[in-house]
Image: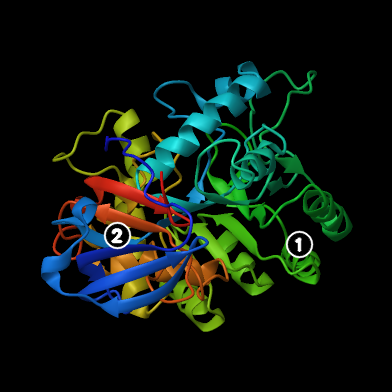
Amino acid sequence: MWPILPQLLLAGSVQLTCAHVLAPDGEHWTAARITIEDGRITAVESGPPGAESPELKGSYLVPGLIDLHTHLLLHAYDETSWDDQVLKESLELRTIRATKQALDTLRAGFTTVRELGTEGAGFADVALRDAIQKGIVEGPTIFAATRAIVATGCYGPAGFDPRFALPKGAQEADGPDGVRKAVREQLAAGADWIKVYADYRRAPAEPATATFSIEELKAAVDEARSAGKPVAAHASTDEGIRRAVLAGVATIEHGTEASEETLKLMKEHGTVLVPTLAAAEAIARYGGWKEGEVEPARLARAKASVRKARELGVLIACGSDAGVFAHGKNAREIELLSACGLSPAEALRAATSVAARVLGREKDLGRIEKGCAADLVALGSDPLADPAALRDVRGVWKSGRRR
């Protein structure tokens, strides 16, 4: 944990000088003086290395990190199972816990997240987003996807006596018209993104299969697009991924079983892969696997998919699926991307400029340049040499204010 220091932003402009500021290309460091006004960077000028701001002496300054796949309304599955969180924890408890988890995420250097489903907690992500925007609580900027949309009978909790209707972790919808209606309801509730499940298990212990038809997925994409909103698709099977790509989704979440042909299709359509390796690793640990042992098949396939995607030129972005594991540990995803063949610079870009592009915010997020939001993270060592440096957070600025 880094200490909470006095706020540095006072009335007027603030200047920060650092000997190691990440250049916009994400490949090298430069000494620079950064001027901040009203939460935005108004100037980045060459600065002498010896004139560092005291709070940045010896630090490496990077843009605020972005995690494109979080679940702030969940907490680690080795604390409480997913079923028990959905069925037994109150909405009030989950929402209150989420405010702490949002702060943990921010203090870990992640100033922006895409929140991909409340998992039974209704529209609480929209409320949390708005509370952060209003300064009621501290946390990252949130792009909310609300409830996620699933085909009937293709999500959990599942495996209970069918006489009883239990709460679901997502919104069920069927047929193109039903899917359009669900999208409209979520947009009206404040969704920034729409999330669909292109595949899932039909029953406990069964393998995942494609669920929505291409026509249903196209209806979701078309309806969201008419409101200017993009769609993310949970998809791990090759057929589910293929259908989602053909339907026009913006991102594939997980993508574990993608064939080479389907990855080429993603490249052709400009579909971004968000692999969530940190969650796959966490689930393997919960199953008893320990680092140094032979990797479980699911984790090995997830890593192989990332390697093949990079080889084929598929754009890869950072999304950790935090909530499966503890919030504030999101940077593990960047480490794993690097371990799967991305250079440290590529892995860092996946959580900065590439993630900003996915959000449609490449002009003001993910870079340290004039006009960008003053979201900054000071690290104790060089993440271009070793992504593990992202664990050593010495300070976080969001909208120009130290948090």
The one nearer the camera, 277 or 47, is: 47
Q: Is residue 224 above or below residue 311?
A: above
Choose top left, top right, bottom left or bottom right for residue 43: bottom left
Instruction: State how the image is colored.
Output: rainbow
Q: Is residue 307 visible?
A: no
* Total marks placed: 2
* Vertical arrangement, residue 173 with respect to residue 86, above or below: below
Q: Position of residue 143 (x, y in %)?
A: 60, 54
State the residue lying farthest toward the left. Answer: 50
| Direction from residue 386 to residue 230 in the image, left or right | right
Q: For the residues marked 2 and 1, what is the alpha-carbon distance in whole angstroms?
A: 30 Å
Work out whether 153 lies above or below 214.
Answer: above
Quadrant of the rendering where the C terminus is positioned: top left
Q: Amino acid at mark 2?
A: Leu
User: Which residue appears at 25% of the width and 46% of the height?
Assistant: 394
Q: Quadrant of the N terminus?
A: top left
Mark with earlier residue (2, 1): 1
* Residue name at image x 61 percent, y 28 percent: 95
* Secondary element type, mark 1: helix
Q: Classify residue 294 as left or right of residue 128.
A: left
Q: Residue furthest front?
A: 11
Dot 2 corresponds to which residue?
337
Q: Is residue 355 left or right of residue 185?
A: left
Q: Which residue is mark 1?
A: 220
Q: Quadrant of residue 352?
A: bottom left
Viewer-nearest residue: 161 or 42: 42
Graded by Cα atoms within 10 Å as few (under 14), some (14 to 19) or many (20 or more), the crowding at tag 1 reads many
Q: Position of residue 266 (x, y in %)?
A: 51, 75
Above or below for 21 versus 183:
below
Label 2 neighbourhood size at 10 Å, few (<14), some (14-19), many (20+)?
many
Tell me the kind of residue under disc 1. Ala
